[in-house]
Image (cartoon, helix red, strand yellow):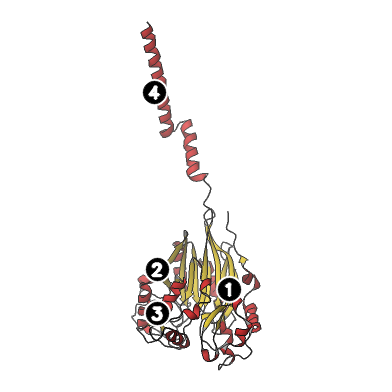
Amino acid sequence: MSKKILSLLLATALSVSLFGCRQIDDSTVSGSSSSKSNSSGLSAVSSESLPAKDPVSIKLVAAGDNLIHNGIYDQARARAGGSGYDFNYAYQNVKPLINGDINVLNQETLLVAPTFAPSNYPLFSTPVEVGDLMIEMGFNVFTLANNHMLDKGAKGIQTSLEYFDKQKEKDVITAGQFRNQAELDEIRTITKKDVTVGFVSITEHTNGLSLSSGNDIKILYTSDEEAIEKQIKATKEKSDIVVIAAHWGVENSGIVSDKQKELAQKMVNWGAGLIIGTHPHVLQPMEYLQNPDGDKVLVAYSLGNFISAMNKAPCMLGGLLDLEITKNYAAGKTAVTSVSFVPIVTHFDARYQNIRVYPYEKYTEELANKHGVRTVKGGYSGFNKAYLEKLLYKAIDEEFLKGSTVNTVSN
């Protein structure tokens, strides 16, 4: 009898145990109330109730026209001791400023020497050592659509692109020069910290130079608004924010033209998130335009020169954009969130000797009083720090010089 009781107790215990196992199994795969509660909890942890990713920000630095006159490359050749070129002296003072995750430069003159002999205005040819140094300094985006891009014809474009082809392993990209339609259709982006920035580079003209009929090379001109709109929208599909490099405006004029303003607003409407202007060789104002979503989009109409050996005093003052771009995962938006303008000064001694660039904050009255632009033909004898300060504050609003917050996209 005791054995029967013991058997009965064991059977009961086994039944409870199996039932319990079945319930646990059902709660994982079936739709019972307990399973919904558990499944819902798991789902919430994995998707709905998990906190959204924190916004992530990157730094972008942009420079104006890298305009290499013969005085610059002749002095670099002399400093190299007769073998190659050493451009370090010209840029050493501003190297620390090129410190973004993304650093953008308008390479105004073609990097095509030694295929072409180095040459000066009006048909430039620049030693590739300039490009080597720019990359070493940190520039990883080169915008190439500008009025000098056809200075050496179709072969110049081909040679320029061959140089940059060799730089791709260094995570360097270009925009603005394309061998054919297929290359134009390749969207130009660079990604840092999960923020993908797309680039479109356009030019107003090419100094009256044109390609022979039937040539496959493609250029985006500001007059071809349909093509620009298409390119911006295609770039927007593959990036978090679209940056336009616009080579436009009137040379040596600090006044923004109506054409610039009209095209800027159109590009913002088409999806541009930032517009960087070059070509006038002098500073032009910065402002915010509003996109269709009501967000502010920064337009810097002209950053002036990064370096040059021009003879006009206003052309000695240029600047860098120092920006924060923030990606907000929760809002699904990426935008410029802070802006600073960093002025720089191109300096040379008498007779264009020792051409170099300084941060404005480190440019002294003593240097200004010795600037070669005071004595060269077409220069200005009254050049000094006060003159530079007047130019600066006339062009750039004080809020940008102190740094300003733009769009708030934090959670």
Q: Earlier in the sequence, mark 2 or mark 4?
A: 4
Q: Identity of the amino acid at label 3? A: Val
Between circles 2 and 4, the one closer to the viewer is 2
Q: Earlier in the sequence, mark 1 or mark 3?
A: 3
The residue that appears at 53% across and 92% down in the rendered structure is 351
Count neighbours of disc 2 (C-alpha within 10 A) and say few if under 14, some if 14 to 19, many if 20 or more: few
From the image, tell me which residue sits under label 1.
Answer: 342
SS of the residue under disc 3 = helix
From the image, tell me which residue sits under label 3.
Answer: 128
From the image, tell me which residue sits under label 4.
Answer: 18
Side (left or right) of 370 relative to 71: right
Q: Earlier in the sequence, mark 4 or mark 1?
A: 4
The quarter of the displayed image where residue 148 is located: bottom left
Callout 4–callout 3 Cβ contact below 8 Å: no
SS of the residue under disc 2 = helix
Between circles 4 and 1, the one closer to the viewer is 1
Q: Identity of the amino acid at label 4? A: Leu
Q: Could you tell me how far apart the alpha carbons at marks 2 and 3 are, in whole angstroms? A: 16 Å
Q: Could you tell me how far apart the alpha carbons at marks 4 and 1 are, in whole angstroms? A: 74 Å
Is 268 placed above or below 30 here?
A: below
From the image, tell me which residue sits under label 2.
Answer: 170
Q: Could you tell me how far apart the alpha carbons at marks 1 and 2 are, in whole angstroms? A: 27 Å
| Foreground of the two, 183 or 340 | 340
